Image: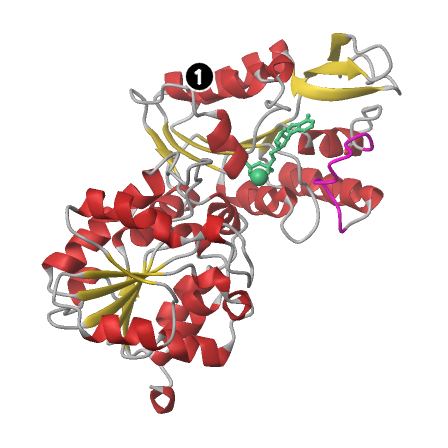
Amino acid sequence: MQTLQQLDFRNKTVFLRTEFNVVLDEYNRVVDDSRIRASLPTISYLRNAGARLVVCAHLGRPWGKRDPSKSLQHLIEPLSALIGDNVIFATDCIGNERMLKQHSLHPGEVLLLENVRYYNEENVNDEKFALSLAEGIDVYINDAFGNSHRSHASMVGVPKHVIEKGIGLLLQHEVETINSFLSGTVHPSLAIVGGAKVAGADGKIHAIRNLISRMDSIAIVGKIAYYFLEATGAGTGATLSADKRQIDAPDSNMSTAIQECAGVLSDAQKLGKIILLPLDSIVLNLETNEMKVIDHLVESVPRNSVAMDIGPRTIDAIKSAAKNAKAIVWNGPAGFFEDDRFKAGTLEVASAIAQSGAKTLVGGGETVTALQNVDLSASNIHVCTGGGAMLSMLMGRPLPAITALLDKTDAKSV
Ligand code: ADP
Ligand code: MG
């Protein structure tokens, strides 16, 4: 796979796929521009190298509809301010207007295309759409790490029709960083996996299964931990059945999920890996709204109660595991942190990691949200820019965006 340094961009028209999926407020102002900032090194590199830059990105999930609140027009000003130059905008990512503006680009100039997800053809990787996106393009560069697990047209279709292609600095850095954690070269290593969704195609069980062979120990927290506790015979009350959000195992049956968890625990045992499950939990009585700490070694979660967060003994166990670790990978909150009553576990995990000084990789949509008010500046933590893509890599799955950069271009289609 070619890196930016291996390619020549002088006078070339370059299609740059970036991840600009920011949140806008009610006035269409960018709430947090860190995703745009993350792609600035690649944008600067390409501009300085003399590229005529065509930037393609998505915003939100309009899936085929021209939703004005998801327009990339809202990013013209912030992007122009960040690069210190005027960004040109095309109101459609394909077609005449774009082609006219693309043809009149000078080296170093940036043309931002309207939201690529205004076309449903993007997410079904429509061949004709990919060809239109690739029109007049000399070099394809992908820097959209956060979208790299999706086989969308701008991610995997366009590079098929461009001979010169390569990986942007952000995508390269994220992939190399995650691979370094998965390489199993630093010991002792600890994975902390939490969150809500255990089973199904994107369930965390696949990440845990892969991490078992790569890390020395794994702490399983969050709602997913209670599937594993059920698998050990510990009673978890209404924890697995009470969640009305249905985010944990929508496409799979609960008892199958528990059986799969039992299989993972026995595999870990065979490999001599340490699995840390919650020793205690904060449980909420659904009838009385009372909260109490349950010690899983001596009692079950009552029938009418749900486990919402890890308890103090579990936090201590994770603290000492983190203290000993030289490398830590963390994905998934330890509890229902959106409710202040159940955020302590997640915040304690964060501070344990920050204090441990271990080289750490953290990622996940909700995990990063939970860390928003935690000061991680003095720590050795890499916060990954793409939760879903990171999870895919933790599962050991190849990223389609990377595979597409390795594929030979079908010369006939160019
Ligand atoms: P991420 O996006 O970081 O990968 P997930 O999407 O897997 O994480 O899960 C995050 C969700 O898991 C959060 O909304 C959190 O409230 C929920 N969660 C974690 N533990 C529990 C629990 N014990 N009960 C209910 N929800 C939980
Ligand atoms: Mg999530």
Q: Quadrant of ligand 2?
A: top right
- Mark 1 lies on a secondary structure that is helix
The answer to whether residue 329 is left or right of residue 332 is: left
The answer to whether residue 132 is left or right of residue 173 is: right
On-image quarter of the N terminus: bottom left
The x and y percentages for residue 186 are 37, 36
To which residue does mark 1 refer? Answer: 351
Q: Is residue 407 visible?
A: no
From what the image shows, is residue 22 above or below residue 135?
above
The answer to whether residue 32 is left or right of residue 391 is: left
The x and y percentages for residue 110 are 21, 60
Q: Which one is nearer the viewer's eye here, 307 or 23?
A: 23
Residue occupying the point 38% across, 28% down: 326
Instruction: Tally the marks.
Output: 1
State yes or no: residue 125 in magenta.
Answer: no
The x and y percentages for residue 253 are 82, 47
Dominant SS type (magenta): loop
From what the image shows, is residue 305 above or below residue 386?
above
The magenta segment: 241-251
Q: Which one is nearer the viewer's eye here, 271 or 275?
A: 275
On-image quarter of the C terminus: bottom left
Looking at the rendered structure, the kind of residue marked 1 is Ser
**Quarter of the image holding residue 195?**
top right
Crowd class of label 1 (few under 14; some 14 to 19; many from 20; radius 10 Å):
some
